[in-house]
Image (cartoon, rainbow, N blue to C red):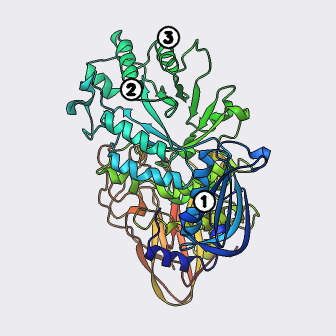
Amino acid sequence: MRLTLALSLALAAATLHAGPLDELLPRPKEAEARAGQWVFDAAQVREEVAPPGVPPPSAQRPGAYELEVGPEGAVIRAADAEGRRYAWATLRQLAELGGGLAPACRIRDWPALRWRGLLHDTGRNFQPVAQLRAQLPLLAAYKFNLFQWHITDNHGWRLQSLRYPQLQAPENLDRSDGFYTQAEFKALIAYAHGLGITVMPEFDLPGHTLTFRRAFGLKRMDEPRVRQIVSDLLDEYAALLDPKVTPFIHLGSDEVQAHERVPDDWLAGWVRQLEAKGFRVVAWGPGQNPKGLDRPLARQYWMGRQVKRAGNEPYFDSQSGYYINHVDPLELLAPAAYQQPCATGPEANRLGAIFAVWHDDAAADPRDVLAMNPLLPALALYGDAFWAGRDADRMDLYGNLPDPRDPAFAQAADLERRLLAHKSLHPLAPFPYWRQTDLRWRLAETAKDLPFADLPWGERVIAQGTVYPQHFFYPQSNLTDGKAGCVWLGMVVESDAERDVPLYADFMDYSRSEGRARDLPLAQGQWNAKGARLLLNGQAIPPPRWAQPGVRSREIPMVDEPWWVRPPLVVHLRKGRNELLVKLPRKGWKWSATCFFPDTRGLTFAPPER
């Protein structure tokens, strides 16, 4: 992130109500404000080796640092290069949030998790090197230190092989004939390393291998020649890597179909081959488990709370909640605020957490992967969760925030406040997040069409812009048992003047991974095929005109299906009281409603009277 004059002026205006020290993400463990401020100048920063006890013994781990800022400059104390990098990241963020002025302060900080990562699937949808490279400084800015590069999948084997060039033949690749040359591969790893980010390349085997099988004319992965081909490829790729720089190689092993399964001794042999070269091998859990290894594989758990059954295996936490291709941008807040990543098992086995962008469906343009998935809000929010950790693992609050009268609600509201301070740091990139914690809905359970005042409103107040009566991944967070088959959401909107205002609304929440194939297709003239309705002061608000009604194919790229990539509606509010009402019948995979005002000036919100 680089300061510009326009950005500095905007930030200076934005920080009148809160100081930069109180807007840092990740939030530091210890922060003490002092009098004064300093005009940021890198030449006035002094680095020192941290003396014993700084940080305290309980926090003496890689990446710990102390930062002191005064009117004359700043001092960084750290025991390693990693800590110095994180101190610089904090210092630069203070200056950016302060419009070029860093507040005087003392910070002592250290990571809760050793590894904090992002996964991009470039096997299904190729992303050019320049697009990946542009994201790496953002990872570093939010103190991530791992980039998992999913390079192979059914749709493409994206890393050049000189031994088997047919893997990159255009006729063997789907969606795009793009691939990374070996020189590009090495250069990106070197660039990431310079930023303090370790690349973990993933070659997904023996499942997800349609391109691989097509390239070699294979029907099954247990055909005898496969064993040597894979061994040759692993030798070729390992020769490009230095295990001191790239300590992990990921071999996938998940979702292995019957025709892809290989003998266990083949998979174990590939693992031993890489371990003999000094690499630590990672595989997905659940997935095909090779037997007879000298030490357990490092696992990456991807489904539900499988990490609770990790046993003695070291593991990365990438449970379903960290798959941002499935989530609505506003849904990110609850898991980031209340979910403790990598929460179970012996401390030595908790390697860290990785959130993932699995844009499984075809993308019309590589940039759509970034536009249609809430990457930047996720970086800031999960950067905080992975670095700072959480006191409890509240899966009952996964998709839905607590009632705002609950003391726990303050945690989400504060995290959102910090997040919105960062939105202006990224003016040229999509940052699909707007304030939602000031909303005040109530839910009523009935299939009857009743006037606003006559609906059987529940006690709970719901303060969020996307609501899940029942969550598609985590039933612990459900708001209803669903027996009524339909819920209503209602809110009173007070406006200080008659005005036209923008309103975002959506009742499908399509995932970018099989979402349209799993759920009912959009129909022209309807909010969804389930009978959803949106009413303002008793008048129905019509949906947008859909660009692609009826589409269910994964191979037809999305256009306007995610609500945040289309312009908001414009609705008319009268001065004083307005009644906003959503009817939401249950049917299909996701049961959700998104409805909020991106511009809340002059508006206040209250729940319906009971």
When asked about the image quadrant of residue 280, the answer is top right
Q: Going 39% across and 13% down the picture, which residue do you hit?
A: 227
* Residue wearing tag 2: 237
Which is nearer the N-term, disc 3 or disc 2?
Answer: 2
* Residue wearing tag 1: 90
Q: Residues within 10 Å of mark 2 (few under 14, many from 20)?
A: some
Q: Secondary structure at mark 2?
A: helix
Q: Nearer the viewer, residue 153 or 502?
A: 153
Q: Quadrant of the C terminus?
A: bottom right
Q: CA distance from mark 2 to mark 1?
A: 36 Å
In the picture provided, is 419 more to the left or to the right than 375?
right
Q: Estimate the x, y position of residue 293 in percent, counting from the top left.
A: 58, 14
Circle 3 or circle 1, nearest the eye: 1
* Residue wearing tag 3: 265
Q: Going 65% across and 42% down the picture, which residue do you hit?
A: 62
Instruction: Identify residue type, mark 3.
Output: Asp
Q: Secondary structure at mark 1?
A: helix
Q: Nearer the viewer, residue 442 or 102?
A: 102
Which is nearer the N-term, disc 2 or disc 1?
Answer: 1
Instruction: Identify residue type, mark 1.
Output: Thr
**What number of labels is visible?**
3
**Residue 473 appears in the rendering:** yes
Q: CA distance from mark 3 to mark 1?
A: 47 Å
Q: Is residue 227 above or below residue 335?
A: above
Q: Is residue 15 above or below residue 75?
A: below
Q: Nearer the viewer, residue 274 or 332?
A: 274
In the picture provided, is 556 more to the left or to the right than 601?
left
